[in-house]
């Protein structure tokens, strides 16, 4: 990988968020998908919000793979995705239809779980009753996965079967009773019957498609969601989402072992952001916070909440790089840091003057960590037209080199604007 440019990537590649999501995965997938034969979503649900800006317009994808704009690639939604059909059909397909983008190459795995109206209601209710709120997106993702693990969730396969009505009515009865809801099964049935007719041509078995493509040496691009610190095991429980968002998620969706992946690209902004509750050691306040929110337009793609910005946290990035065995780093939004006289980067943590490493799965521990910073000089030049690393201002080059050195993974992609192609390949 060391000497390979992502511009000419080949084989099996995945994109994984490193800290708390919203790092530009949608745009990276859109940029890389021109070489993909397959683009596959393997985790998350409509909590995901992937922004793509290209010649067709600006889009917010939640369930639909961000590779859908490469009409030659087959787009897959794996069994590990929580399928919110209200989002997929009424929002995302509507966005695509408006821009005359076809989804004829889409296949949704028949084993994928359905996010149903009761999951969204339960997500909201649970959050209301939590003493310490997680700040979920209320998209029903946690309850969808909980029901799958409990073996009571409906799947795409059920929606397509002739006894869907019976299954649905039975489940609504149970949900109403257990959770004191007032759901009307007939109304839900009518809506989902429409969905099932619309989706029928796009339902199939995705695992053999991936296997065949792999055997034929085709290029497969896996689109991750969220970020490692939101992984249900690796992240700061309970301030996490409800799935494995790293390489294990690919295995769970597509039976493809992590050792079969050629390029594992970890993606982070040039700074950090977090939306929802939970510790963020490098969180900024004051004027710098406002500058980053405004310049970076740090408003959540899914929930419209303001994201909390912080300096780049290399302790977390290093831990996530090790956890996912990254082969390359993608750093986005470098342009947003333009204009800062000094930029800080967190290189280690201390608790009571003792240096500590990130401890997986422990929110209380991370909340106690004090960041230790390295301060570097910033730059003033506009980066948006730069396409070669050596043309970047020296201080921006230096910033990237520090990241590369401290994480010990080569930076292979830098973005300097939100649009397709506003990138530097190394
Ligand atoms: P994702 O969830 O990882 O796909 O990221 P989001 O789409 O939720 O958030 C990333 C935001 O940053 C989106 O609004 C993108 O359009 C924007 N963005 C991505 N890359 C860049 C970049 O290099 N520069 C700037 N200024 N904006 C970017
Ligand atoms: P993308 O793919 C940022 C956060 C929520 C909340 C926590 C749990 O766009 O990077 P959930 O609704 O999953 O139960 O919420 O996880 N969260 C995200 N934050 N980007 C995302 O996805 C997120 N998906 C979930 O804000 O803190
Ligand atoms: Mg997002």
Image: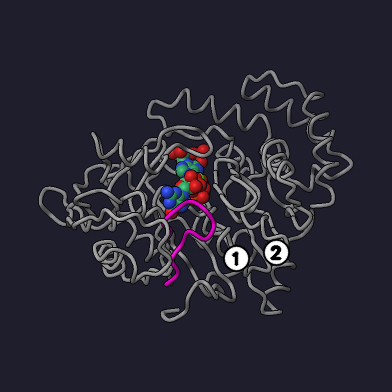
**Bounds of the magenta span?**
415-426
Quarter the N terminus occupies: bottom left
The secondary structure making up most of the magenta span is loop
Which residue is the site of mark 2? 73
Q: Is mark 1 within 8 Å of ligand 1?
A: no
**Residue sitting at 73 percent across and 54 percent down?**
109
Residue 9 sits in quarter: bottom right
Q: Are marks 1 and 2 in contact (CB under 8 Å)?
A: yes
Question: Relative to residue 197, is residue 50 drawn left or right?
Answer: left
Looking at this view, name the residue that lies furthest to the right. Answer: 162
Please provide percent x and percent y for residue 64.
Answer: 66, 49
Residue beneath the point at 73% across and 27% down: 172
* Residue 426 drawn at (x, y percent): 42, 72
Relative to residue 298, is residue 90 drawn left or right?
right
Residue 239 lies in quadrant: top left
> Is residue 193 on the magenta stretch?
no
Residue at disc 2, secondary structure: loop
Q: Residue 417 magenta-drawn? A: yes
Q: Which residue does the numbered mark 1 point to in the structure image? A: 221
């Amino acid at each position: 990988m060391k000497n390979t440019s992502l511009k000419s990537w080949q084989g099996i590649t995945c994109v994984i968020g490193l800290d708390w999501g919203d790092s530009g995965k949608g745009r990276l997938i859109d940029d890389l998908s021109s070489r993909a034969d397959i683009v596959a979503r393997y985790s998350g649900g409509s909590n995901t919000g992937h922004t793509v800006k290209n010649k067709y317009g600006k889009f917010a994808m939640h369930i639909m793979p961000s590779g859908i704009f490469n009409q030659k690639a087959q787009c897959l939604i794996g069994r590990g995705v929580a399928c919110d059909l209200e989002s997929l059909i009424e929002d995302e397909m509507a966005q695509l239809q408006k821009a005359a983008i076809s989804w004829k190459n889409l296949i949704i795995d028949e084993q994928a779980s359905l996010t149903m109206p009761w999951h969204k209601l339960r997500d909201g209710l649970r959050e209301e009753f939590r003493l310490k709120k997680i700040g979920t997106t209320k998209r029903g993702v946690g309850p969808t996965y909980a029901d799958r693990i409990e073996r009571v969730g409906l799947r795409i396969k059920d929606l397509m079967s002739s006894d869907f009505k019976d299954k649905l009515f039975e489940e609504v009865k149970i949900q109403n009773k257990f959770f004191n809801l007032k759901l009307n099964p007939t109304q839900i049935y009518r809506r989902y019957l429409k969905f099932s007719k619309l989706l029928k041509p796009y339902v199939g078995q995705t695992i053999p498609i991936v296997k065949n493509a792999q055997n034929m040496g085709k290029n497969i691009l896996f689109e991750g969601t969220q970020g490692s610190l939101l992984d249900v095991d690796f992240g700061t429980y309970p301030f996490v989402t409800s799935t494995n968002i790293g390489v294990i998620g690919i295995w769970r969706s597509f039976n493809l072992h992590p050792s079969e992946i050629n390029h594992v690209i970890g993606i982070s902004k040039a700074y950090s952001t977090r939306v929802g509750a939970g510790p963020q050691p490098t969180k900024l306040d004051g004027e710098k916070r406002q500058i980053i929110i405004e310049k970076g337009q740090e408003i959540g793609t899914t929930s419209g909440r303001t994201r909390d910005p912080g300096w780049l946290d290399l302790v977390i990035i290093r831990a996530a790089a090790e956890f996912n065995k990254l082969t390359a780093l993608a750093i986005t939004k470098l342009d947003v840091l333009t204009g800062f006289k000094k930029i800080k980067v967190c290189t280690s943590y201390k608790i009571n003057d003792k240096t500590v490493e990130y401890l997986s799965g422990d929110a209380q521990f991370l909340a106690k960590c004090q960041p230790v910073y390295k301060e570097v000089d910033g730059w003033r030049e506009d980066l948006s037209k730069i396409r070669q690393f050596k043309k970047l201002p020296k201080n921006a080059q230096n910033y990237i080199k520090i990241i590369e050195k401290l994480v010990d993974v080569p930076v292979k992609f830098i973005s300097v604007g939100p649009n397709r192609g506003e990138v530097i390949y190394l």
